Image (spheres, rainbow, N blue to C red):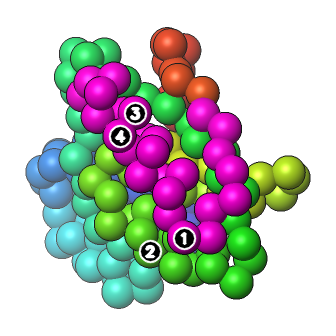
Amino acid sequence: MKKSDQQLIALLQDNARRPVSELARELGLSRSTVQGRIRKLEQEGVLKGYSVILGDEFLREQIAAHVLIKVQQKLTASISRQLKAMPQTRALYAVSGDYDLIAMIQSDTTVTLNQTLDEIGNLDGVERTNSSVILETKFVR
């Protein structure tokens, strides 16, 4: 990957809504070159999409938890699909160790967080869970 593509990706990660003309100016390239590079990176699957980054104030009001999940191996795909369908699930990771998955859960109240944790624990194929509520985020890259 070209160094200019890496720089372009970093700028887009910082603010994907930045105008192409501004990106071109910062990279020292023409607007059409940057537009073409973005299109090529999208076609190659390097840039898959653009997302919304929630504001710090909104996130401070949310309750987040890591949920370690031990599953019956034959039901991992089914459980993953069901977790993806839950709007409170922000991310899901397959991991090594005593547990098979880690779900990142986010909710607006402790009541809905508890309901979500119960729902996860009751999924067919979930053997056990272990949850940790996040008290403070020190940093995210």
Q: Is residue 79 above or below residue 93?
A: below
* SS category of the residue bearing label 3: helix
Q: CA distance from mark 2 to mark 4?
A: 18 Å
The label on residue 115 is: 4
Q: Is residue 76 visible?
A: yes
Q: Is residue 80 above or below residue 13?
A: below
Give the label, 2 or 4, closer to the camera.
Answer: 4
Q: CA distance from mark 4 to mark 3?
A: 4 Å
* SS category of the residue bearing label 2: helix
User: Residue at the location (77% across, 53% down)?
Assistant: 99
Q: CA distance from mark 2 to mark 1?
A: 12 Å
Q: Quadrant of the N terminus?
A: bottom right
Q: Earlier in the sequence, mark 1 or mark 3?
A: 3
Magenta stretch in the rendered image: 105-131
The image position of residue 78, as x and y in percent, is: 52, 79
The image position of residue 140, as x and y in percent, is: 51, 29
Q: Earlier in the sequence, mark 2 or mark 4?
A: 2
Residue at which label 2 appears: 81
User: Residue at the location (42% across, 69% down)?
Assistant: 82
The label on residue 99 is: none
Q: Is residue 117 above or below residue 125?
A: above
The label on residue 124 is: 1
Asked whether the residues under the numbered discs 4 and 3 touch, taking CB atoms below 8 Å apart as contact, a structural biologist would say yes
User: Residue at the location (57% across, 80% down)?
Assistant: 77
Q: Nearer the viewer, residue 63 or 45?
A: 63
- Tell me the kind of residue under disc 4: Gln
* Mark 4 Cα-neighbour bin, 10 Å: few <14, some 14–19, many ≥20: few
Q: Where, by quadrant of the figure, is residue 45 drawn?
A: bottom left
- Tell me the kind of residue under disc 1: Asp
